[in-house]
């Protein structure tokens, strides 16, 4: 089966690792993700991952409750490292070669983030997990995902969520919510749709990097997207000189 994408960046929220728990890491959920990633890696796809830390610590919320924002964000970055190590462990149990690269140096746990080294790992068939966001406070892991995807030359960002795409409203609370199959970056920004934060969407728009929002819990969803099947919601620019080439 022909592949639509050869190099992808998978963005996972920290909450995705909780499964049905209210906090922390659910081993069964992490194992499911590892099996899904292994399936895609077996296709020869070069795969990198950015994970959030909201299942352990959410910097924005802590800052609203009185903690100094920069400190809260650094704590959130450390939470992403914990999640990255958990996913690495699960992948290696399935014999998937994996490297964790951290934007905050911690040599005993992870490699420092070096773009050329990350690309080399991908070329050798290793899954690369980018931890600690951008290494800077005030930036989300969504923005980190957009930044890393562009740095490594990814073809697409796959944003795994708990719903099967982008809706006009919360489908859990509003039964009349409409699901979008396709959106432009400007539509996402103007409608205030929760695809990724505005900084991340703008970065993707400026570099014509498509985003696919899909249900992470659907077995085989990542494989189907890579095979070009219509899963979730595709966010991209209007067809123009650059868009046609990127979106083929």
Image (spheres, rainbow, N blue to C red):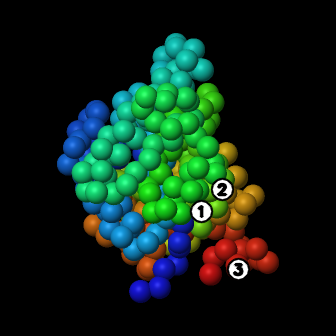
Eye-nearest disc, 3 or 1: 1
Q: Residue at label 2? A: 150
Which mark is first along the chain, 3 or 2?
Answer: 2
Horizontally, is 225 left or right of 91 in the view?
Answer: right
In the rendered image of this protein, does residue 197 appear above or below residue 182? above
**Residue at 29 percent of width and 33 percent of height:** 24
**Residue at 28 percent of width and 66 percent of height:** 219
**Residue at 44 percent of width and 72 percent of height:** 44
Q: Residue at label 1? A: 154
Q: Position of residue 199 (x, y in %)?
A: 67, 45
Q: Which mark is residue 192?
A: none
Q: Position of residue 132 (x, y in %)?
A: 52, 35
**Residue at 32 percent of width and 68 percent of height:** 39
Eye-nearest disc, 2 or 3: 2
Badge 2 crowding class, 10 Å Cα cut-off, few under 14, some 14 to 19, many 20 or more, is some
Q: Residue at label 3? A: 244
* Residue 41 showing in the rendered view: yes
Horizontally, is 88 left or right of 206 in the view?
Answer: left
Badge 3 crowding class, 10 Å Cα cut-off, few under 14, some 14 to 19, many 20 or more, is few
Which mark is first along the chain, 1 or 3?
Answer: 1
Badge 1 crowding class, 10 Å Cα cut-off, few under 14, some 14 to 19, many 20 or more, is many
């Amino acid at each position: 089966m022909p592949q639509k994408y050869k190099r992808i960046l998978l963005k996972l929220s920290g909450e995705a690792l909780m499964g049905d728990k209210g906090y922390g890491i659910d081993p069964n959920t992490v194992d499911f993700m590892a099996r899904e990633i292994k399936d895609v890696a077996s296709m020869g796809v070069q795969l990198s991952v950015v994970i959030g830390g909201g299942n352990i610590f959410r910097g924005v919320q802590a800052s609203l409750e009185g903690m100094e924002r920069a400190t809260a964000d650094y704590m959130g970055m450390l939470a992403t490292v914990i999640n990255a190590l958990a996913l690495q462990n699960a992948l290696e149990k399935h014999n998937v070669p994996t490297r964790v690269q951290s934007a905050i140096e911690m040599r005993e746990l992870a490699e420092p983030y070096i773009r050329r080294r990350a690309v080399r790992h991908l070329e050798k068939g290793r899954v690369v997990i980018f931890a600690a966001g951008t290494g800077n406070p005030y930036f989300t892991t969504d923005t980190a995902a957009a930044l890393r995807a562009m740095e490594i030359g990814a073809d697409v960002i796959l944003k795994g969520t708990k719903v099967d795409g982008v809706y006009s409203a919360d489908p859990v609370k509003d039964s009349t919510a409409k699901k979008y199959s396709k959106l432009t970056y400007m539509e996402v920004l103007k409608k205030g749709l929760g695809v990724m934060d505005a900084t991340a969407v703008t970065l993707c728009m400026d570099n014509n990097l498509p985003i696919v929002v899909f249900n992470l819990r659907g077995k085989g969803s990542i494989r189907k997207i890579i095979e070009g099947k219509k899963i979730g919601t595709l966010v991209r620019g209007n067809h123009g000189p650059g868009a046609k080439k990127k979106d083929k």
